[in-house]
Amino acid sequence: MIRSQQSTVRSAWAQDLVHGAAVTLPAASSARRLRVIEGKLWVTLTSPVASSDEWLARNEEFELPAGESAVIEAWPHARFEMLAPLHST
């Protein structure tokens, strides 16, 4: 788990999950961070090479590497946001 600097990331979107609901986060071309706003999330990386499980509580973050997809599930509920790096223009 990593702590991010507010100046280097932006929120791409936020979502609520209820108990038992699972969401697949598809792979992306750049790394992203998942931050729990409320509740608890179970995160499973779906890489065939190195799958892993992580538990995240409120205010914790997890870096989702470029090219990795993940399945997340709320326990018992959660609100989370996806953080994306800020791009210079």
Image: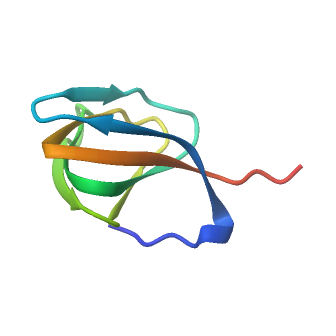
Q: Is residue 67 left or right of residue 50?
A: right
Which residue: 18% across, 43% down?
77
Q: Between residue 41 and residue 77, name the one nearer to us.
A: 77
Task: Give coordinates of residue 63: x percent, y percent.
Answer: 41, 55
Which residue: 49% across, 42% down?
66
Task: Give coordinates of residue 42: x percent, y percent.
Answer: 17, 46
Vertical placement of residue 69 versus 11, above or below: above
Which residue: 17% across, 41% down?
74
What colour-coding does the image apply? Answer: rainbow
Q: Quadrant of the N terminus?
A: bottom left
Identify the residue at the far right of this view. 89
Q: Is residue 60 left or right of residue 39?
A: right
- Dividing the picture into quadrants, the one containing residue 44 is top left
Q: Is residue 10 left or right of residue 63?
A: right
Task: Give coordinates of residue 87: x percent, y percent.
Answer: 76, 50
Q: Between residue 20 and residue 32, name the one nearer to us.
A: 20
Q: Is residue 85 left or right of residue 32?
A: right
Count of labels shown? 0
- Dividing the picture into quadrants, the one containing residue 59 is bottom left
Task: Give coordinates of residue 68: x percent, y percent.
Answer: 39, 37
Which residue: 11% across, 35% down?
19
Vertical placement of residue 71 versus 31, above or below: above
Q: Between residue 27 and residue 71, name the one nearer to us.
A: 71
- Dividing the picture into quadrants, the one containing residue 16 is top left
